[in-house]
Amino acid sequence: MTTDTTPTVTAGTGPEPLLIEQSRPGTPGHQLPALDVPAVDDLEGQLLRSELRVPELGELDVVRHFTHLAQRNFSIDSVFYPLGSCTMKYNPKINEDVARLPGIAHIHPLQPDATVQGALQIMYELQNLLASITGFRTATLQPAAGAQGELAGMLMMRAYHLDRGDTKRDKVLVPDSAHGTNPATAAMCGFRTVTIASDRQGDVDLKALQAELDDTVVGLMLTNPNTLGLFEQQLREVTSAVHQAGGLMYGDGANLNAILGVVKPAEMGFDCLHINVHKTFSTPHGAGGPGAGPVVVGDKLEPYLPAPVVVRCDDGTYALDNNRPKSIGRLKGYNGHFGILARGYTYIRMHGPDGLRTISETAVLNANYLRALLKDLYDQAYDRSCMHEFVLSGRRQKQTTGVRTLDIAKRLIDFSIHPPTIYFPLIVEEAIMIEPTESESKTTLDNFGAVMRQIAQECEQSPETVLNAPHSQVVGRLDEVTAARKPILRW
Amino acid sequence: MLRVIGIERVEQLFSDVPEDARFPTLDLPPALTELEASRHLTALASRNVSVRDWPCFIGAGAYNHYVPSAVGHIMGLPAFYTSYTPYQPEVSQGTLQTMFEFQSLVCDLLGLDVANSSVYDGASAVGEAVLMAQRLTRRERVVLAGSVNPQWRDVVRAYVAARGVDMATSQISLESDGLREQRVLDLVDEHTACVVVQQPDFFGHVRDLNGLSDAVRERGALLVVGVADPTSLGLLKSPGEWGAHIATAEGQSLGLPLQFGGPWAGLMACKSEYVRQLPGRIAGQTLDHDGRRGFVLTLQAREQHIRREKATSNICTSQTLLAIGVSAYLSLMGPNGLREVARQSHAKAVYAAGRLGALAGFEVVTPRPFYNEFLLRTPHNAGWLQRELVNDKLLAGVPVGADYPGLDDALLLAFTEQNTRAEIDRLVEALGDH
């Protein structure tokens, strides 16, 4: 196996001036047709703005500017992007075509139902598809992203307890391996968070959990497989213990990509689950959004779903149902991220039941293969077979060579590989979290293994090469401390 | 691969999953090929009427403005849409610089000092602004103008409800000379964190906010101004010029397709002294070790991945791709283009109001001046009328009776530069026939 060790320059070469620096005053803006009704001047001066400082550029200037900027990005379409916990799988192009159909892209959310039957049908069917895949009863498609899905789920759990007259529950349990959004969401709901330790196997410590289970528990927020890439071995014991205490099980579906057709979360005792459509169902991550975060629920939480939900009427037509008296209300304007949902719907329909299971099997296979390739080079956080991702530790390199995980990540850039997630989960020292996804070929995985082997050698033989990486980009390591101390946040 | 792992079958990797629940049957339709999926989705899409098929006079928080062709192509650059949050700045300078530019444009447009790189939409931006005001003032009560978009108010209610907060909304009433609104200041007390108004308001009225900011601040609260159609800012005074402490806007009007409700982008800006309570991702300018300019995610000590339960918000993703679209739109339009969009949208609405108000039994009840939207009382139930006009192939506004009891006969109509005089005349004729 050979590896190209020559750093490649993949980004643009010079600095790209800011839009405002390229502004040429007097450049006409986009031209509209002449006004075909009488011009009016009825807005008094005190209502009008004094100046509008927006750059003035020609169309070609604008197109080139953004093209140059795009060249400064790594993306799935250009490089391997094993960013753990983010499921950076390939985003099929057909999804983009679907989203650009005029009947998808150019419909107003407040049109009469009769004029949007196709859109409502997509939403209705997607509610059912997501429920079938996860074993739940139905879904809300409203949340804009996973974190808003968490908020929806936790508000529903709160409403459930209050509706039963159970008013003293204010404690949310969160494992120490959880995403930061979990405790932040609990806080937004006015709850206090208690962190539950993980045991030596990387699972929820059942004893630590039981010690916190009392009649003030709202529920447990659990990611499964967890952020260590491990399927909770005592999952049923965990969920039944929480239920016995009167609590509910919130499922963080960030890692759903590992278990499609493998297990239904509802059958494991979860009461609801949010789904990151932009992870599991292949919709593009958009440089940091948009996502979509539908929540699937069982019978207990169904009455509290955000309104509206899409229903099928007796005459076969589809409608938005706002008549939901126990609903937690509305978390987002209009109908959720429909453009994203339509892409996810397309993806599910193109895979079907067998295809979905193959996705998860391949994602898990790829992760275990990479884990096997790397296990003698880097410490493993847990010596267990993993699900769709796994966590290494750079502590050996740090101790013996002074090279930290951050440096290893930066060095990967020189080989045109996007670094994995680093320093998360928080409970693993010098964590390197790797998620290859099912999209990648064995060739790509082998290349990654060879590059990681070379970097491990560099750590010992020429650590300065790693410490000073990357060597191939338009900028080197940036001064983040000054950026935060003396913030420059606009031109 | 199996040999390297040391197993014989892939199924062995799932031994941690309880056996009785392992590999369940999924009750899903069989897989479609790409061609079949394309046909199926095209058929579903064709069951929708798009705003390119029929004239659209629906606004109420989302507007059918023209999007220059280049915007969609820029948003379609794979290096933008298939990348993720710029955790590694050296390989994300494109995204980070666009975030910085977007923040700058939002500051200019809204007339404030600092902006984040976007939140989910205009509605959740108001929700986040309210939570931010509560943290800044350490007060709980929230006062909303009744003329704030009802969906935005619903979102605020859901966002603050968990903390048992009291929310007060000014009353809207219909008087002989048009719509009236109770003074929001009369609802402000010593527990009030903020006053939220929309500009122009939900009924299209351009409010005179002179003095409101000082009066709110004297009472220890903050003023939040939300903008539903920011093309209005091509002409109208910005929230910052009105003295807003926090401003929000729905970015959809600025180059983003309607998409049945999203994804769009929530714009959010504030005075500089409040920046540490601003939620969401923020990009900052800095230097690398060779003194080259670069951009990084900054002030991350506000955020959930660092602060966990003490974070300013649970928000993780922003709407970066949509923010890129907004930046592309604003730079293509320039100040003159945006002013022209505003001038034309306003003129079309004024023309329509003149003609519709002259119809027997119809009355424009939004107080003057309005921007590009107004409430029209009709001789009929407005929901019925809206559905009737589907027969005329017109998307003729939205009824507001569900949110404003007593206004069951009123249609909210919006106009943009895309509505031709001929389309407006068709609307007038169709309404006049009912």
Image: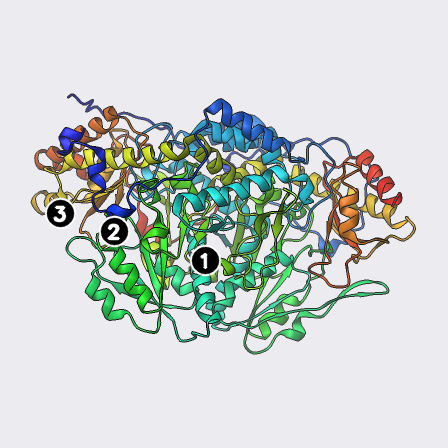
Q: Helix, strand or loop at disc 3?
A: helix
Q: Could you tell me residue B185's position as x and y percent?
A: 66, 72
- Mark 1, Cα crowd under 10 Å, few <14 / some 14-19 / many 20+, is few
Q: Visible in this render: residue B255?
A: no
Nearer-the-camera pick, B324 or A266: A266
Q: Helix, strand or loop at disc 1?
A: loop
Residue A291: numbered disc = none
Write down the residue under mark 3: A395
Same chain check for tags 2 and 3 = yes
Q: Quadrant of the N terminus of chain A?
A: top left
Nearer-the-camera pick, A368 or A471: A368
Q: Is residue A53 above or below residue B241?
A: above
Nearer-the-camera pick, A417 or A194: A194
Amino acid bearing label 1: Asp
Write down the residue under mark 1: A299
Same chain check for tags 1 and 3 = yes
Q: Helix, strand or loop at disc 2?
A: loop
Q: Is residue B67 above or below residue A40?
A: above
Amino acid bearing label 3: Arg
Chain to which mark 2 belongs: A
Q: Could you tell me residue B130's position as x and y percent?
A: 53, 63
Q: Could you tell me residue A69's position as x and y percent?
A: 43, 32
Amino acid bearing label 2: Pro
